[in-house]
C-alpha cells in the first residue's frame, strides 16, 4: 500500500513537472508545422483538454488497472486483459506514450536500454558486495591493525569521491593513457555489432571500467557498515558462548557473526542496487554505456519529455520493488524479525 501511494506521488510530480514544458506539437513536428497538423497532435496528446483532465488521462494510461475504449486499445496497441463492451476494464502493461523524436513507444525505448543498466548495476553491486563484506569482516577481526586503518581510510576516500569525478579519472587513466596495457577503452556499450552479419555480441571489456567506477561508493559504505556491525556482534554473549564451546573460528565468524550483522548491510546493498538500477546517469554518459541513464540524458537534451517521464516512473518502480525485497530478506537472514 505504501508502494502504491509512493508511485501515485511520483506520477503526480512527474506530470506537473514536465507536462506543459514547451509546445509538444512543435517538438513532434518541428517549428514549421502547419496549424492543422499542430491541432491534430494536440488532440492526440489531450492538450486540448483541461489540465486536471489531462492528468487523469495520463494516470489512466500509466496505471496497470484502467478503463480504455476499444479505439484506445487499438490505437495505443495496449497489451493485457480486457473485459467489457465499448469501454473495457483493462489489466495491462502501463502505457508510457510515444517518444516525440523517434515516434517509438517509450516502453520499447526503455526496454532496449534496460538490459545494459541491469548488467552494469549487477556487476557493480557484485564487486561492491563481495569486496565490501570481505574487507569489512577482515577489518573487524583485525581491529586497530594496519589492515583496519587501511580499510577505513580507503572507504572514506571512496565515499568522498563523486562517481562522475571517479568516472572521468578512471576512463582517462585506464581507457586512454594506459589503454595499450589494459586493452580497455574510454567509451563503449555492452554490445558490439558483428561486421559480417550485423548481429550483436557481448563485450565484457567495456563493462570493467564503468562497473568499477559505479561500485566504488557502495563498496566503501558496505565496508564501513560490515565492520561496524561485526564489531558490535562479536562482543555479544552468544558469540562468546560459541567460542567457549570450541566451535571453529571460521564458523563463529561467518555463520554466527556475519549472519547477525547483515541487516544494516542488506539495507545498504538493496538501497544502492535500487539506485544503480534507477540509472547511473553520469557514469553511463561518461562511458557511452547504453542504459536507462544515458537514454534519459539524451532525451533531456532533445526535450523528449515522454521518455524522461517514463524513465522516472520505471526508476521509482525499481526503488519500491527493491525495498519490498529488502523487507523479505530481513526475515530470511534474521528470523527474529518475523516475530515482531
Image (cartoon, rainbow, N blue to C red):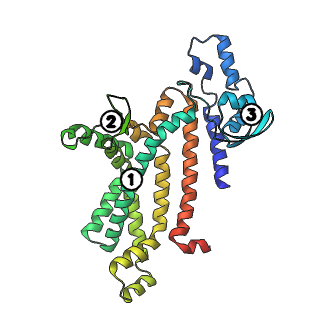
Q: Secondary structure at mark 2?
A: loop
Location of residue 278 in the rendering, given as x and y in whole percent from the top left corner: 50, 45
Residue visible at 56% across and 75% down?
Answer: 336
Q: Which residue appears farthest toward the front when viewing the image? A: 197
Q: Secondary structure at mark 1?
A: helix
Tell me, for residue 52, which label it has, or none: 3
Mark 3 nearby-residue class (10 Å; few <14, some 14–19, many ≥20): few
Is there any visible trace of residue 308 in the rendered image?
no
- In space, the residues marked 3 and 1 are separated at their CA atoms by 42 Å
Chain-order first, disc 3 or disc 1? 3
Tell me, for residue 217, which label it has, or none: 1
Q: Which residue is mark 2?
A: 187
Q: Nearer the viewer, mark 2 or mark 3?
A: 2
Residue 324, by quadrant, is bottom right
Residue visible at 32% across and 28% down?
Answer: 196
Vertical position of residue 51 compared to residue 244: above or below: above
Mark 2 nearby-residue class (10 Å; few <14, some 14–19, many ≥20): some
Residue visible at 68% across and 21% down?
Answer: 42
Q: Secondary structure at mark 3?
A: helix
Location of residue 268 in the rendering, given as x and y in whole percent from the top left corner: 47, 59
Location of residue 223 in the rendering, given as x and y in whole percent from the top left corner: 37, 62
Q: Is residue 198 left or right of residue 75?
A: left
Amino acid at each position: 500500500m505504501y508502494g502504491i501511494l509512493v508511485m501515485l506521488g511520483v506520477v503526480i510530480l512527474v506530470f506537473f513537472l514536465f507536462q506543459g514544458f514547451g509546445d509538444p506539437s512543435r517538438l513532434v513536428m518541428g517549428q514549421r508545422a502547419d496549424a492543422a497538423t499542430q491541432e491534430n497532435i494536440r488532440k492526440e496528446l489531450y492538450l486540448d483538454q483541461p489540465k486536471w483532465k489531462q492528468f487523469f488521462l495520463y494516470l489512466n494510461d500509466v496505471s496497470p488497472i484502467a478503463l480504455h475504449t476499444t479505439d484506445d486499445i487499438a490505437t495505443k496497441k495496449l497489451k493485457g486483459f480486457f473485459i467489457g463492451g465499448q469501454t473495457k476494464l483493462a489489466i495491462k502493461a502501463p502505457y508510457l506514450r510515444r517518444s516525440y523524436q523517434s515516434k517509438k513507444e517509450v516502453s520499447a525505448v526503455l526496454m532496449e536500454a534496460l538490459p545494459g543498466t541491469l548488467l552494469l548495476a549487477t556487476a557493480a553491486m557484485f564487486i561492491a558486495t563481495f569486496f565490501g563484506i570481505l574487507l569489512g569482516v577482515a577489518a573487524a577481526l583485525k581491529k586497530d591493525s594496519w589492515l583496519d586503518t587501511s580499510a577505513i581510510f580507503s572507504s572514506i576516500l571512496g565515499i568522498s569521491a563523486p562517481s562522475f569525478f571517479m568516472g572521468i579519472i578512471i576512463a582517462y587513466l585506464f581507457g586512454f593513457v594506459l589503454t595499450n596495457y589494459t586493452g580497455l577503452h574510454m567509451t563503449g556499450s555492452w554490445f558490439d555489432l558483428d561486421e559480417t552479419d550485423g548481429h550483436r555480441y557481448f563485450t565484457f571489456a567495456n563493462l570493467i571500467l564503468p562497473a568499477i567506477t559505479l561500485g566504488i561508493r557502495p563498496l566503501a559504505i558496505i565496508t564501513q557498515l560490515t565492520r561496524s556491525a561485526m564489531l558490535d556482534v562479536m562482543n555479544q554473549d552468544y558469540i562468546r558462548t560459541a567460542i567457549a564451546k570450541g566451535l571453529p573460528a571460521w564458523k563463529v565468524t561467518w555463520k554466527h557473526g556475519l549472519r547477525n550483522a547483515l541487516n544494516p548491510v542488506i539495507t545498504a546493498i538493496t538501497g544502492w542496487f535500487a539506485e544503480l538500477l534507477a540509472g547511473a546517469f553520469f557514469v553511463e554518459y561518461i562511458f557511452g554505456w547504453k542504459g536507462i541513464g544515458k537514454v534519459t540524458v539524451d532525451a533531456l537534451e532533445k526535450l523528449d519529455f515522454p521518455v524522461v517521464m517514463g524513465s522516472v516512473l520505471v526508476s521509482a518502480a525499481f526503488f519500491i520493488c527493491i525495498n519490498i525485497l529488502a523487507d523479505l530478506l530481513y526475515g530470511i537472514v534474521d528470523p527474529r524479525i518475523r516475530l515482531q
